[in-house]
Image: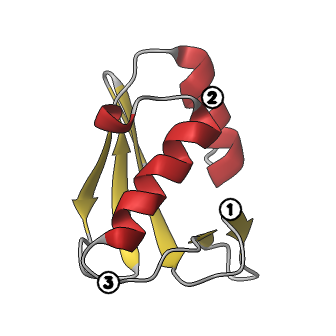
Amino acid sequence: MNNMDKGLTVNLRISPNSSKNEIVKTEEGIVKVKITAQPIDGKANKALVEFLSKTFKIPKTSIVIVRGETSKDKTIRFITADKEKIQSIKEIFGIIDG
């Protein structure tokens, strides 16, 4: 999990084909994003970006899958200069400054 000039990079694990869209933290401290879409033809990735966009009120074009297009483990980049939105993302993903 990385802080950059205009935005934030986070690591997460996607769980496609779930019963509902939600963000959960596992006992191991891994942030898992459950998505209802199936992992076929990029549908789960698209649904992931849409869900994160709605959750954090950031445009879909400002959420980039940096690594893990075809993997359950992904690195996501949120591109925003809005400190409140960055703080909200940090709180949900359990990122501690320091």
Q: Quadrant of residue 55?
A: top right
Q: Position of residue 2 (x, y in %)?
A: 39, 45
- Tell me which amino acid carries mark 2: Gln
Q: Quadrant of residue 18?
A: bottom right
Please name the residue shown 34% across and 30% down the image. 79
Which residue is at the front of the view, 3 or 37? 37
The residue where tag 3 is placed is 40
When the figure is inspected, residue 5 is found, relative to residue 61, above or below; the finding is above
Which residue is at the front of the view, 95 or 81? 81
Label 2 crowding class (10 Å Cα cut-off): few <14, some 14-19, many 20+?
some
When the figure is inspected, residue 37 is found, relative to residue 87, above or below; the finding is below
Label 3 crowding class (10 Å Cα cut-off): few <14, some 14-19, many 20+?
few
User: Mark 2 falls on what kind of element?
Assistant: helix
The residue where tag 2 is placed is 87
Q: CA distance from mark 1 to mark 3?
A: 21 Å
Please name the residue shown 24% across and 80% down the image. 70
User: Mark 1 falls on what kind of element?
Assistant: strand
Q: Does 2 sit left or right of 94 as displayed? A: left
Q: CA distance from mark 2 to mark 3?
A: 32 Å
Label 1 crowding class (10 Å Cα cut-off): few <14, some 14-19, many 20+?
many
The residue where tag 1 is placed is 23
- Tell me which amino acid carries mark 1: Ile
Q: Quadrant of residue 74?
A: bottom left
